[in-house]
Image: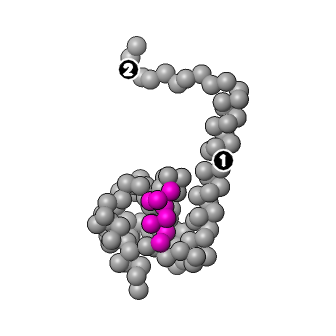
Amino acid sequence: MNGVPQVPALTADQRRAALRKATAVRMRRRAFKDEVAEGAHGMAAAIGLAKADETLSGIKTVDLLKSLPGVGPKKAEALMVEVGIAPSRRIRGLGEHQVSALIARFRS
């Protein structure tokens, strides 16, 4: 073989279960981002909740920033650059300095 892993063949039931799980994850992430957009969670609380929940920790940091009131795509990208976070970084991958910088930025 050429080193490329083979995708395991799934039964129809396994495929349906995987689709249901993926849909549930997307719905949970969307609901969380909606809560953030409505102001139910500040930055510190949002990051804390996301880091504690495996489902939410997979949200891209830039998507979480864009869900905050008053933060659009340009401002989110600028914040990512300012804090030194890669565009593809997910919440679970943020370091403590990055988390502290984001929380400090939104404390006021």
Whether the magenta-drawn stretch holds residue 49 is answered as yes
Q: Is residue 44 left or right of residue 17?
A: left
1 or 2: mark nearer the eye:
1
Seen from the viewer's position, the closer of residues 9 and 54 is: 54
Q: Any mark on residue 3, and which? A: 2
Secondary structure mostly seen in magenta is helix
Q: Is disc 1 placed on a helix, strand or loop?
A: helix
Say which residue appears at 43% left-offset and 73% top-offset: 44
Is any part of residue 72 visible from this angle?
no
Q: Residue 89: x percent and y percent?
A: 40, 55
Q: Amino acid at mark 2?
A: Gly
Q: Is disc 2 placed on a helix, strand or loop?
A: loop
User: In which quadrant is the N terminus drawn?
Assistant: top left
The residue carrying mark 1 is 23
Cα gap from disc 1 to disc 2, whole angstroms: 31 Å
Q: Residue 2: x percent and y percent?
A: 38, 17
Among all residues in the image, which is located at the extreme top?
1
Q: Residues within 10 Å of mark 1 (few under 14, many from 20)?
A: few
User: In which quadrant is the C terminus drawn?
Assistant: bottom left
Say which residue appears at 33% left-offset and 71% top-offset: 100
The span shown in magenta is: 45-53
